[in-house]
Amino acid sequence: MKDIPKFALTLLIVTIIASGSLAWVNKITKPKIFAIQSRDLNNGLLNVLPAAKNGVIVPVKSPSDPDNILYYEGFADKDKTKLIGYAYLVPASGYSSIIRTLVGIDTVGNIISIQILSQQETPGLGTKCQEIRSGESKPWFQHQFAGKMATNLAVDKDGGDIVSLTGATITSRAITNAIADSSKSILGLINK
Amino acid sequence: MKVTQELFKGIYSSNPVFRLMLGLCPTLAVTSSVNNAIGMGGAATFVLISSNFVVSLIRKFVPSKIRIPVYITVIATFVTIVDLIMAGFFPDLHKSLGIFIPLIVVNCIILGRAEAFASKNNVFFSLIDGLGMGIGFTLALITISTFREILGNGTWLGMPVFGSSFKPALLMILNPGAFFTIGFIIAFLNWLDRKTSVSS
């Protein structure tokens, strides 16, 4: 019993040092990580809306909450006259992580391209959603979404035509269904 | 205590996966491809060396009754620091290794070596032990994943091994394939041990 204050004190010191060093590292790395994330997002937006390369991509914010970006509008010119499509971020609850996918659609809702920005699925199974097969330049799982109607998607096991990842049906289904659901609500907002 | 002895015990005679049966959970998870095995091995080796260093450094100040929570705190802190620094300064490395980092916290090799070695030995030998165990873990992962990737996917490190007529045995890259492979390798090593001990 008489040791308990000593134990508590030791644990207190260890956890204070641990949280102190974590706070310090976090303070240094946070702006860097934020910069990398926004760079990845900008690169991703250009990948899913390639026709906006010489134009602009502008965020459309929620009228009630200016911090909340609903979707992006892509224009083929700098004067915002030639609207070529929309892009939006789709979060999907995968097998072991939130999968963040960027989706680019044309003005009527056909997918131009999708890009998975981040995921932490099971290595070797769910992570194959980003696999690039040898001899190919694009990840095959993401590439098969191109040209399909964004609101009407399903994996092969649910009767659709998205070929699911072997051993990772949950990941495949999560991405596919999340894109279809988000696309319905985003297109509802756009056509309002 | 010799340096080479401490280094090589982790690679063969006390290999964490095949001999100590430690870290089997991440082993099952990541050995579906050689690429993942190298990534996980590298990241785990780094954390193993670092946590052995810190645990050995503080071993005289930590009362033995509360050593486990202290070690867990040290390891979890270290893994988080590695994760943040990698995400901030080496984003490409983080993209390929990022998925393994949370797995390292629960890798019992790290805690196992902190408890069995670093808490009882000086800083130098703890570093050597961490390095040896890390290399042993990495080699074990590469061995298992070589069998699984070739048989289950027809590739090695992403390169096709067989002609296009080869139909991969999918079971091998799923979880049962890991149990089969580990079982066969351990059986082989035990057979090898028995054979050498009989002849000598």
Image (cartoon, coloured by chain):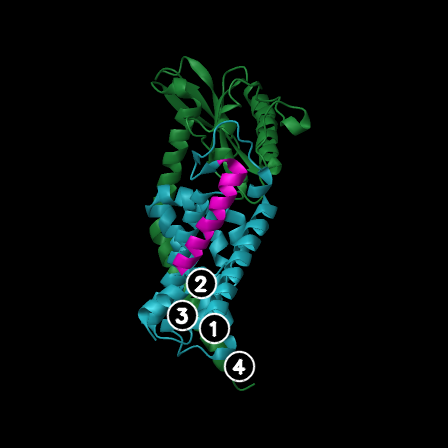
Chain colours: A green, B cyan
Disc 2 marks which amino acid?
Ile
Q: Chain of mark 3?
A: B
**Helix or strand or loop: what does disc 1 sit on?**
helix
Q: CA distance from mark 2 to mark 3?
A: 9 Å
Q: Chain of mark 2?
A: B
Magenta stretch, main secondary structure class:
helix
Residue topped by disc 4: A4
Q: CA distance from mark 1 to mark 3?
A: 14 Å
- Which of the marked residues, 2 or 3, is nearer the chain's N terminus? 3
- Which of the marked residues, 4 or 1, is nearer the chain's N terminus? 4
- Front disc: 1 or 3: 3
Q: Is residue B146 magenta?
A: yes
Residue B43 position within the rendered picture, expressed as x and y whole percent measured from the top left: 40, 53
Query: Contact, CB < 8 Å: mark 3 with mark 4?
Result: no
Residue topped by disc 1: A11
Q: Is residue A68 magenta?
A: no
Q: Nearer the viewer, residue A133 or A54?
A: A133
Residue A44 position within the rendered picture, expressed as x and y whole percent measured from the top left: 41, 30
Disc 4 marks which amino acid?
Ile
Residue A127 circle label: none
Residue range highlighted in magenta = B134-154
Q: Quadrant of the C terminus of chain B?
A: bottom left
Residue A19 position within the rendered picture, expressed as x and y whole percent measured from the top left: 43, 62
